[in-house]
Amino acid sequence: MNLTEKILARASKRESVSPGDVVFADVDKAMVHDVSGPGVIKVFEKLRKRGIDTSRLWDPSRVWVAEDHFVPSAEKISAQNLVRLSEFVRSHGITKHYRYGMGQYGICHSLSHEEALVLPGEVYVGGDSHTNTTGALGAFACGLGHTDMAYVLLKGRIWFRVPETILIRISGRLPGDVTAKDVILRIIGDMGTDGGAYRTMQFAGDTVSDMSVEDRLTMCNMTTEAGAKNGIVEPDAKTLSYLESRGARGVHMVRPDPDASYHQTIEYDAESLVPVVAEPYSPDNITPVAEAPSEDLDKAYIGSCTGAKYEDLAAAAHILKGRQVRIRTEVLPATMSIYRRAVTDGLVSTFIESGAMVGPPTCGACCGAHMGVLADGEVCISTTNRNFPGRMGHPGSRTYLASPAVAAASAVTGRITHPGDLD
Amino acid sequence: MTVDCPAGRAIKYERDNIDTDVIIPGQYLKIHDYSELATHAMEGMDPSFHSKGGSYIVAGRNFGCGSSREHAPIALAESGIRAVLALSFARIFYRNSVDGAFLLPIEIGPDAYSGISDGDDISVDIDGGTLTDHTTSKSYAIKPFPGIIRRIIDSGGLFGYDPE
């Protein structure tokens, strides 16, 4: 069995599983946030009307809650949702609640690795599609809706169809200007937004071994954009060291069997890759930066679970150091722990001196909800993961997806720019 | 949810990748009142959605791609949509529709996709595996639901389903 099959077999107490099997898997960790949490509360209300007891969760110690989409509250409904979520947390005995304005908090997928909340070999489900992110730590990490999350919270398990695995093997040394974001955009460009549908995307090869854990998180984050059930990377010494440095102990390094098989293997030569952007309105609409349209941008956004980890901010700061932004530029570190390091290491000063705005961790503008949405006709370059019509604001706005380095270079010129082309 | 799909009007969107952001834009994710969500259904791409009085949506590949927001099938179902008939579905939209018993995600073939026009009167016979376009008097095969999906549908959603 391969990595995903092995995790699902263990979790469903089977000797082995094969793609296509339907299993009920025991869940190790579960997450809801300030959208899916109130969604679960609503499902619980419906269940109680049917006489189903919702007073006790299967295991509150395995559940954690993030406040990320609608913080800081822009209006009354969002504020009320946080109050309801806090009451839910309290009444169900959940201890891990990462609250806005109370120390460590931030985007759920970034907390999952910053706080080492998910370990290799675990089944981790979250009420958000980008739960796939955390598969970079060697877990089976998969996004679910509100009814499914309510089922998980009450019963501790959920059904899955065992996915076929697409092995994406990347070999060689990445050119100096090519980042993990460019690699995953290129892969999505080749596969299409449903090219990984219902399947696992597993990343391997010496290029992936050479990548940092954060780069691997960027890769797995965007497997969602190819429709994948999960993204995964086999855990290694880097994974172990990353998790232990964040307090994890007793990490079990899950390995595929020697005779593991894959539905399909796709090979990439790292040296052939170039920096790219995804043009509106789809993450698979890829163009090399060198050939990107020369149009005036209105905003650069460096944020989200995809593009506001510490190394993302460092890459952007490296470009912005000693330069001035020419367009509206917003930097929103993904979690407070990342924000704190960015202050200590001088990144925040660099951003502010460049003219950029540094804001609090939030999903707000990435999903067009609040905190800097786009107006009709505005054009944005963004380190986020989606550029569907209206994704970041008005349906008449347009977003280019890019790496933090390309977004920062473009902030300096006001047009899509290769970092190497800056003076 | 019912597997009963009586004759009703089809709204056809001749495009692939209709994502959850256009089905229910992100600014409404804070809303959890089902009837209020319905008022914003398809707001991201079709402001005239509600005036069409549709019972079915017919669309191309990868319907419901994007976020895990259960608001998407809820907003459609509360707007009177009984089933979405598409060439294929994104996985979370598909399982949300079934597990929450909001609407039926039915896979159709290219013949039905090209044969059905916007505004046609259609019905679906789930057990018989056929879709009928009463406007053109043509019938098409639909793809049967996988075993577990059918059992969850027949159980009225995941919470009614007993895996043992």
Image: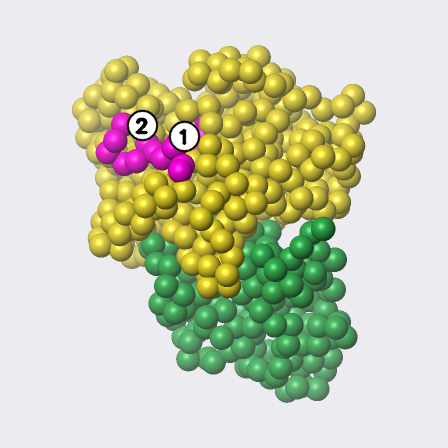
Chain colours: A yellow, B green
Give the residue type that dot 1 points to.
Answer: Leu
Which residue is disc 1 drawn over? A111
Give yes or no for contact between labels 1 and 2 (Cβ–Cβ under 8 Å). Answer: yes
Above or below — where is A357 with respect to B130? above
Give the residue type that dot 2 points to.
Answer: Gln
Residue at left offset 25%, top offset 31%: A102
Query: In the image, A373: left or right of A173?
Result: left
| Distance Cα–Cα, label 1 vs label 2 | 9 Å
Please indicate, yes or no, whether residue A308 appears anywhere in the rendered image. Answer: yes
Above or below — where is A333 with respect to B129? above
Mark 2 chain: A
Q: Residues within 10 Å of mark 2 (few under 14, many from 20)?
A: some
Above or below — where is A258 with respect to A145? above
Q: Secondary structure at mark 2?
A: loop
Residue at left offset 58%, top offset 57%: B159
Please indicate, yes or no, whether residue A226 appears anywhere in the rendered image. Answer: no
Mark 1 chain: A
Bounds of the magenta span?
A93-113
Residue at left offset 69%, top offset 31%: A10
Of residue A379 and residue B44, the one placed in the foreground of this image is: B44
Q: Secondary structure at mark 1?
A: helix
Image coordinates for residue A296, horizontal then vertical, percent: 30, 44
Of residue A404 and residue B47, the one placed in the foreground of this image is: B47
Q: Residues within 10 Å of mark 1 (few under 14, many from 20)?
A: many
